[in-house]
Structure formats: C-alpha cells, structure tokens
C-alpha cells in the first residue's frame, strides 16, 4: 500500500541536555518520528568535542535492539535521524547522522528535504577536489558548512543557506552546540521544545510529547536557531521569501497528534472532511475511512452530513512497511495483508469511502474491489485533497509525473480505472479553507513551485545526488 502514497523522506531530532541521557531521549524521539522514515536510523552524541555515532539500516527498534548501544552513547547533546530514501539510494553510506572530521574538529548533520540545485553544487565541490562518500545531498550541505567554517558555526550555516536552494530542515552539531535551520519558505517542518530548562529540536511536535518536553514554537522560515549551555538564541539568515509550508504534511505525512506551524494535523484533516461534505453531500448508508490518515476526514464528512460512520476496513497494525511476498499471487493480494474488509458492516450498504489521496490508483482499485467483495452495493470514493498531477522536488517521494494517474486521466477516467460508482476530489479552495487560508505549497496539485525545480524538470535526475 505504501508504494501508492507519497512518502516523507526523513525525520530529525536534536537535544542539548547535559544532565539527561541524551541518547535515550533521542531514541524515544525517533520512535515518535518513525512514520517519516523507515529504512535507516541513527543517533550521534557529543561531549562538546568528540562525536560518537551508531546508525544502520532498519527501523529504530531494529537498529537499537541491543540496549547497550544506547547506554554506550554518552554525551551532553545528541542528534537523531530516521530516513526514507529515493529509489536506488538505500545505502548504509547514506544513513544519518553524517559525521566528519575537519580542520576545526568534528561535526555532525541530519537533514530532511531536497536541494533543487544539488547537481550544480556537487559539480562545483568536486572541481575543488572535495571527495564524497555518499549519494545524498545532505553531504553537500555538510561540505559547504565545513568550507565556510572559520570561527563561528552560525556564520558558516548562514553562508551555506545563501548557496543552497530547495526545501530543508537541518540540524548541525559542533562547537559545543546544536544549530537548527529551516529553508526560507518553511517547506519542511521543524520545531523547538524545552525539557527541564534544556532545549531540543524535532521535525514534529509529537516527538516532544513522547519525551515530556514542552512545545515552544516552530523554527521560523529562514531562521538559524542555536541551543547550547547558554540556552536558546536565534538569527534570521534569510527574509522576504513567501512562506510555503507543505500542504501534504497535513493531508497525509505527519502524525495526526502533531501541530505544525500552529495548525493541528488531526483538526486540519477533520476540516478537510467537512469541506468535502459541503462540496459533495452524497446519499449513503455509511461513511468509512481508509485507515489511518483518512479517518479524521471521514469523521468530518460523516458528522457534517449526518451519515453513519463505521470502520469498514480493518488495519493489521502488526505489519510493517515491508513484508515477504513469495509469489506473484501474494503480491497481488498484498492489500489484504494490511487491510481487510468488515463484511458485517459493509454487506448491502451504499458506502462513501474517504481517503487522503490517489497517486497511481492501484491501491484504490484493490480497496474498492475488497469493499465490493464484502457485499457493498455501491462504493463512492471521496478524496480529501485535489488530484496529484505534479511531482514533488522538496523531500517527498512522489511518482514521476508520467506515472501519476491524475496526470494521465481526467476524474471520470480515474473513476472507471478504480471501479468506483463515483469519485470526487476536494477542491483547491476547499483545501485552503481547511488549512485556514494560510500560505502553503500546493505544487503537487497546481504545478506552481515556490522554488524552481531542476532545469530539466526530471525527478530521476535528482536521484544520484538528492536523497533526504
């Protein structure tokens, strides 16, 4: 199922707390961010001079299955990272945190996002004799910071931000401090928390909750925030850019208990369902969600229309992102492993099924077949976002544009392909209303990019140097 959804590429966490077990706190923070990346995980700790790191392929619980790995990482500050990569770059060399020795000591970096000018920057660095050990654009950022570092690490980060283009939330650990920086448009999320007087960074506020930290605020677009023994300080590196927070964080990517840029994710999804109800008040016996991201929208739709809400699809919560598929028949039935229909609820009913998005359409096709197999008379599909017609270049792995079903078919063609009795998408105006009419990036729907994509407009060209 996950292959038919946009996927976030990374989650980052950082904490400065000399009195605490920073590695263990980072471990729990990464656990809360596991949905943002499920291919590799890592933690780096520092005593202010030396940096020790452990990272490997796998989930957080797999990478740190031996508790001795956590207890062996001792330091007054720590960085953590969970990662999902683009195609072809599932390599241990790309796992983060990235740690380097350079003329001013040691430095570590974690990064969520994508640089749109990564190809040019890497070519320039290679011409200067810089050697790369990975295929991730995160190493480009690390090399730029190291090259600019003279005395003040913050100045090096600011100079680097003048060079890089795209979307990023980065944490840098060195010089006895952790620096958090967010791209000038605020596309990728990053927030600040406080735990017993010590500060931390996280991609989402849910990671603060799990360690008992109090949410302070979001890192502002273009801001360079520093946490150290002196507490929290801030510089504004770039200003004047138009804010363009990622709308898909609220549609699908983020955890529903997170609040991003002052908007709660669960509430925004609920409002998307209410907007769907205002636009398409269909006659039906019951409303069912595609769990889990479709659940708040389905509740919003059901409450607004007065229709009965039911769990018609049951999710197997013990199946990970990947599982063994030994035969072609098993691969074709993979949806049944993660979701099963509740025949008692569905039989003989006219059903409205609410999902957050359709990318390729193959999962929607199988889900509708499943609901019909359970005896539903009619299946009406409602999507709590507009049609995804364009690829993302900012750190979300969508399919290449030619593989996006909404780029190749109109709504009626998609309806016939997935086998629904009707199909309706939330309008762009409805999505903006659900997001409180604030400034969001909607490039995957509109094709209007806040940062120009790579010159060739080809997502595949990024994969040799862009990752997360």
Image: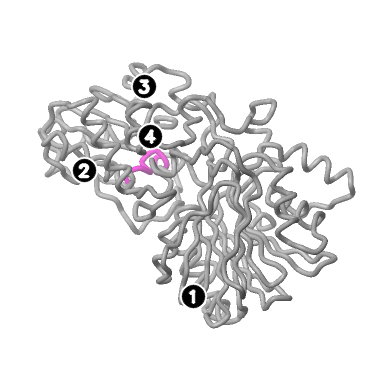
**Mark before the other along the chain sequence, 4 or 3:** 3
Judging from the image, what secondary structure is the residue with disc 4 in? Answer: loop
Q: Which mark is residue 389?
A: none
Residue interval drawn in magenta: 329-336
Q: CA distance from mark 1 to mark 3?
A: 53 Å
Q: Residue at x 20, y 32 (%)?
A: 352
Near mark 3 (Cα within 10 A), the count class, few <14, some 14-19 or many ≥20, is: many
Is 466 positioned to the left or the right of 336 in the image? right
Q: Quadrant of the N terminus?
A: top left
**Mark before the other along the chain sequence, 3 or 2:** 2
Main SS, magenta region, reads: helix
Choose top left, top right, bottom left or bottom right for residue 181: bottom right
Q: CA distance from mark 4 to mark 3?
A: 28 Å
Q: Which mark is residue 414?
A: 3
User: Which tag is nearer the camera, tag 2 or tag 1?
Assistant: 1
Q: CA distance from mark 4 to mark 2?
A: 22 Å
Which residue bears the numbered disc 2?
299
Which residue bears the numbered disc 1?
197
């Amino acid at each position: 199922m996950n292959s038919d959804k946009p996927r976030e590429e990374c989650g980052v966490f950082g904490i400065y707390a000399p009195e605490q077990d920073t590695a263990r706190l980072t471990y729990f923070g990464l656990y809360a961010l596991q949905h943002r990346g499920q291919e590799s995980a890592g933690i780096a700790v520092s005593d202010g001079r030396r940096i020790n790191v452990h990272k490997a392929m796998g989930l957080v619980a797999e990478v740190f299955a031996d508790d001795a790995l956590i207890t062996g990482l001792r330091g007054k500050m720590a960085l953590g990272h969970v990662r999902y990569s683009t195609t072809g770059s599932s390599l241990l060399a790309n796992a983060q945190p990235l740690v380097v020795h350079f003329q001013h000591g040691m430095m570590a970096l974690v990064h969520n996002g994508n640089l749109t000018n990564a190809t040019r920057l890497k070519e320039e660095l290679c011409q200067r004799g810089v050697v790369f050990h990975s295929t991730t654009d995160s190493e480009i950022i690390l090399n730029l910071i190291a090259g600019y570092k003279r005395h003040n690490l913050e100045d090096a980060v600011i100079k680097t931000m003048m060079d890089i283009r795209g979307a990023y939330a980065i944490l840098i650990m060195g010089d006895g401090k952790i620096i958090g920086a967010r791209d000038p448009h605020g596309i990728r999320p990053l927030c600040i928390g406080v735990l017993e007087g010590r500060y931390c960074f996280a991609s989402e506020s849910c990671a603060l909750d799990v360690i008992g930290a109090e949410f302070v605020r979001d890192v502002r677009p273009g801001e360079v925030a520093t946490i150290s023994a002196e507490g929290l300080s801030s510089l504004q590196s770039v200003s004047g850019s138009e804010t363009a927070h990622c709308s898909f964080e609220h549609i699908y990517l983020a955890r529903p208990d997170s609040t991003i840029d002052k908007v709660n994710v669960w509430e925004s999804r609920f409002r998307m369902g209410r907007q769907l109800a205002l636009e398409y008040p269909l006659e039906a016996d019951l409303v069912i969600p595609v769990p889990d991201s479709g659940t708040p929208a389905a509740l919003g739709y059901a409450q607004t229309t007065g229709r009965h809400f039911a769990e018609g699809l049951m999710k197997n919560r013990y199946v990970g992102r990947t599982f063994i598929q030994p035969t072609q028949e098993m691969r074709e039935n993979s949806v049944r492993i993660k979701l099963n229909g509740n025949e008692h609820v569905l039989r003989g009913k006219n059903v409205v099924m609410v999902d957050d998005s359709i990318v390729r359409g193959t999962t929607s096709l199988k889900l509708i077949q499943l609901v019909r197999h359970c005896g539903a008379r009619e299946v009406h599909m409602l999507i709590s976002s507009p049609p995804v017609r364009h690829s993302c270049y900012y750190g979300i792995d969508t399919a290449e544009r030619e593989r996006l079903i909404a780029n190749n078919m109109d709504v009626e063609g998609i309806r016939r392909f997935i086998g629904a009795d009707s199909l309706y998408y939330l309008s762009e105006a409805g999505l903006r209303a659900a997001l409180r009419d604030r400034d969001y990036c909607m490039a995957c729907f509109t094709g209007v990019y806040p940062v120009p994509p790579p010159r060739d407009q080809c997502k595949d060209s990024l994969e040799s140097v862009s990752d997360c």
